[in-house]
Amino acid sequence: MGFDFSKIKVKEPGHLHFGTAGIPISTDERNTIGGIKQVKRLGLDAMELEFVHSVNLTPERAAEVYEANRSENVLLTCHGQYYINLSPLEKAKQGASRARILKAAEIARMAGAWSLTFHSGFYMGREPSIVYPIIREQLKKIADELDENSNNIWIRPETTGKGTQFGELKEILQLSQEIEQVMPCIDFGHLHARTNGKNNSPDEFRQILSSVEKSLGRKGLDNMHIHMTGIAYGEKGEKHHLNLDESDFNYKELLKVWKEFKIKGAVISESPNVEVDALMMKREFLKL
C-alpha cells in the first residue's frame, strides 16, 4: 500500500456513538466533508462512509476528510462494496473480493475510519461447515496483509438478513475469536429478518449481547459496530429496509438492553429516513 498509517490517529469509542449510513439526507453540500459537518450540526457523532458501489474517495480526498474531521471529531465507519464474495464457487474470483476489501480498508483508514464492514459471502447451496473455513482463510489473508502494512482498521463481517448469505451471529463471533483484527458488525434488523421475526424481545436481545460477551469478553461489548433499520421480511428473510416506526422491530426495548449491558461503539442508522431514525435512537437512548 505504501502509506504511513501511523500518521492516522483514531481513538477507540469511549461511549455509544449514533450516526448515519452515508451523507445525511438534509446535507446541502453533498460530499463526505459536508456530510460530516451536517452530522455534527444535527447532534449526531458518527457517519458511515458508503463504498457500497465503489471506493469513492481518492487518497488525496481521504486525506482532506481526515484533516476536516479532526475538528468535528465524528466517529467514521465504512461499508465495503456489495460485490464481495469470499466464498465463490470459482476460486479464481476470491482474489478480486480480497482486493476490494483491502482497497476499502486503505482509503477508509486514510480518511480516519475506525471500522470497516461488509457482507462476506454466500453458501451457494453448500453446508455452512464447508463455507466457514473458506471465508476464514480469506479473512486471515486480509488481516495479515493489513498487519504487514500497519493498517489497524477493524475488519467486520456483518450478520446478514437472508439464510442464503453467510453471516449467522455464531459464525461472525467465531471468526472474531480466531482472527486478530476481526470483530463483528451486528445488524439487529438482519438478525430479526433472517429468523423470520425472531430476535425481537428483550430476552433475545440479552442473549445476543451475552453471546458477544461470552465469545469476546468485555472488549466485545466496548467495541461494537451496529447497524439499525426496520426491515420488511418473509420466509426467506430480508426484503427491504423500512423506517423503524413503520416496522415491527422492537427497537425501544433493544435500546434498554444496550443501556443495561453498557455497550460502546457505533450505531449506524440504515433506515430510508437515515438521520431521523439516528436522532430518534440517540434521544431515546439518552433518556434511559
Image (cartoon, rainbow, N blue to C red):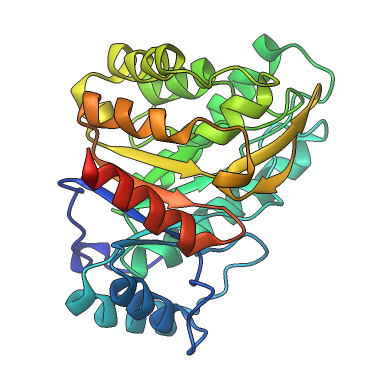
Counting the numbered discs, the total is 0
Residue 152 appears in the figure: no
Residue drawn 48% across the image and 71% down it: 24
Residue 42 higher or lower than 94, as above or below: below
Residue drawn 50% across the image and 43% down it: 228
Residue 71 appears in the figure: yes
Q: Position of residue 147 (x, y in %)?
A: 33, 45
Please state if 36 lies on the left or on the right of 169 as rendered. Answer: left
Residue drawn 66% across the image and 28% down it: 193
Residue furthest bottom in the image: 29
Q: Position of residue 49 (x, y in %)?
A: 47, 64
Please state if 113 lies on the left or on the right of 94 as rendered. Answer: left
Q: Position of residue 274 (x, y in %)?
A: 52, 61
Residue 254 higher or lower than 171, as above or below: below
- On-image quarter of the C terminus: top left
- On-image quarter of the N terminus: bottom left
Please state if 273 lies on the left or on the right of 202 as rendered. Answer: right
Please state if 98 lies on the left or on the right of 281 as rendered. Answer: right
Q: Position of residue 154 (x, y in %)?
A: 36, 44
Between residue 248 and residue 146, name the one nearer to us: 248
Residue 62 higher or lower than 13, as above or below: below
